[in-house]
Image (cartoon, rainbow, N blue to C red):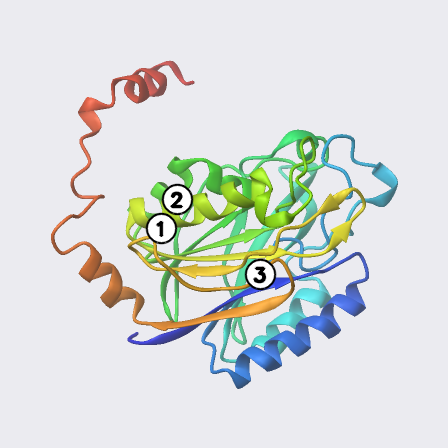
């Protein structure tokens, strides 16, 4: 699709859905004024994230929505010709069972383009959310995309699966807090702050893709979120970023062209040697 303007959002979203939608309308308007084609919002944009990662309070969980909820329809209307990704708590019946997922959806004015249910659940999140089962890329008017949700990016296999499925842009939507066990006095010095940035750059470079990382900011319950939204090029170079405060990081580039250029001499996906990864092969055979 040629040159695109890609935006990654750092912002705080809480439980109040009407307030979240009003804030979202302002962010989308600012992004549109900046000429953004692809806008990636944080995980839990609609309804906020958990207040406690170790012992989530059942009385203060995010509201559950489904893909055809009025709130998602309002986001679709807001998006118009912009491709937009955001996160929410998905609630519904799957195979006759009530299920709740931490979900990301990608849409534009025409409807839903792709979706992802978070696979990897840290700490107490497994007490609230069911696990998604797969990673799959999908086609959009801007090219082939893939999505992950925060802790998913800790696992190299997740991003690699999407890159192998043809995605040239990977969007990672996060509600990633500072350390809950050993919090630093200043966010930039926090262990989780360093890991958040490290994973963003490593996943982009090892897969030679464009990486778009959004995150929540502010405080919810006992969690303090890092911000640090960014757009990373296929060489692992940060093209645009925010601080720990709210903001919009915008980078202009040709994703397909940049990915092709990065892979011209060293093509990491093509140069894999699966037969040499003995432990992985054994784990696959044993179903580990």
> Marks 2 and 1, Cα distance to the nearest angstrom?
9 Å
Picture quarter containing residue 146? bottom left
Residue 157 placement, left or right of 222: left
Q: Position of residue 97 (x, y in %)?
A: 69, 35
Q: In percent of the image, x 80 and y 45: which residue is there?
A: 61
Mark 3 residue crowding within 10 angstroms, few (<14) / some (14–19) / many (20+): some
Q: Tell me the SS state at disc 2.
A: helix
What is the quadrant of the C terminus in the image?
top left
Please indicate, yes or no, whether residue 50 appears anywhere in the rendered image.
no
> Marks 1 and 3, Cα distance to the nearest angstrom?
20 Å
The answer to whether mark 2 and mark 1 are in CB contact below 8 A is: no
Give the mark nearest the N terminus, 2 or 1: 2
Report the mark closest to the observer, 1 or 3: 3
Mark 1 residue crowding within 10 angstroms, few (<14) / some (14–19) / many (20+): many
Q: Position of residue 209 (x, y in %)?
A: 32, 55
Please indicate, yes or no, whether residue 139 appears anywhere in the rendered image.
yes
Q: In percent of the image, x 23 and y 67: which residue is there?
A: 257
Vertical comparison of 136 with 246: above or below: above
104 or 178: which is nearer to us? Answer: 178
- Residue closest to the far left: 265
Report the mark closest to the observer, 2 or 1: 1
| Residue at which label 1 appears | 204
Mark 2 residue crowding within 10 angstroms, few (<14) / some (14–19) / many (20+): many
Give the mark nearest the N terminus, 1 or 3: 1
| Residue at which label 2 appears | 159
Q: Tell me the SS state at disc 3.
A: loop
| Residue at which label 3 appears | 243
Q: In percent of the image, x 69 and y 30: which residue is there?
A: 181
What is the quadrant of the N terminus in the image?
bottom left
Q: Position of residue 130 (x, y in %)?
A: 64, 35
């Amino acid at each position: 699709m040629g040159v695109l303007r890609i935006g990654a959002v750092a912002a705080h979203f809480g439980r109040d859905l009407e307030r979240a939608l009003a804030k979202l309308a302002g962010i989308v308007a600012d992004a549109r004024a900046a000429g953004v084609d692809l806008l990636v919002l944080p995980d839990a944009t609609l309804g906020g994230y958990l207040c406690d990662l170790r012992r989530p309070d059942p009385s203060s969980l995010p509201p559950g929505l489904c893909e055809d909820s009025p709130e998602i329809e309002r986001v679709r209307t807001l998006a118009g010709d912009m491709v937009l990704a955001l996160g929410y708590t998905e609630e519904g019946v799957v195979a006759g069972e009530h299920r709740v997922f931490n979900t990301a959806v990608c849409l534009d004015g025409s409807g839903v383009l792709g979706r992802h249910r978070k696979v990897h659940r840290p700490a107490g999140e497994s007490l609230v959310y069911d696990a998604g089962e797969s990673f799959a890329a999908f086609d959009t008017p801007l090219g082939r995309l893939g999505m992950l949700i925060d802790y998913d990016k800790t696992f190299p296999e997740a991003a690699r699966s999407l890159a192998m499925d043809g995605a040239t842009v990977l969007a990672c939507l996060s509600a990633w807090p500072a350390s809950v066990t050993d919090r630093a006095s200043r966010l930039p010095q926090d262990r989780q702050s360093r890991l958040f940035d490290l994973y963003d750059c490593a996943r982009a470079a090892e897969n030679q893709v464009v990486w778009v990382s959004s995150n929540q900011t502010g405080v919810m319950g006992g969690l303090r979120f890092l911000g640090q939204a960014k757009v990373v090029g296929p060489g692992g170079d940060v093209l645009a970023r925010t601080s720990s405060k709210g903001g919009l990081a915008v980078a202009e580039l040709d994703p397909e062209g940049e990915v092709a250029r990065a892979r011209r001499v060293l093509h990491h996906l093509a140069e894999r040697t699966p037969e040499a990864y003995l432990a992985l092969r054994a784990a696959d055979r044993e179903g580990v």
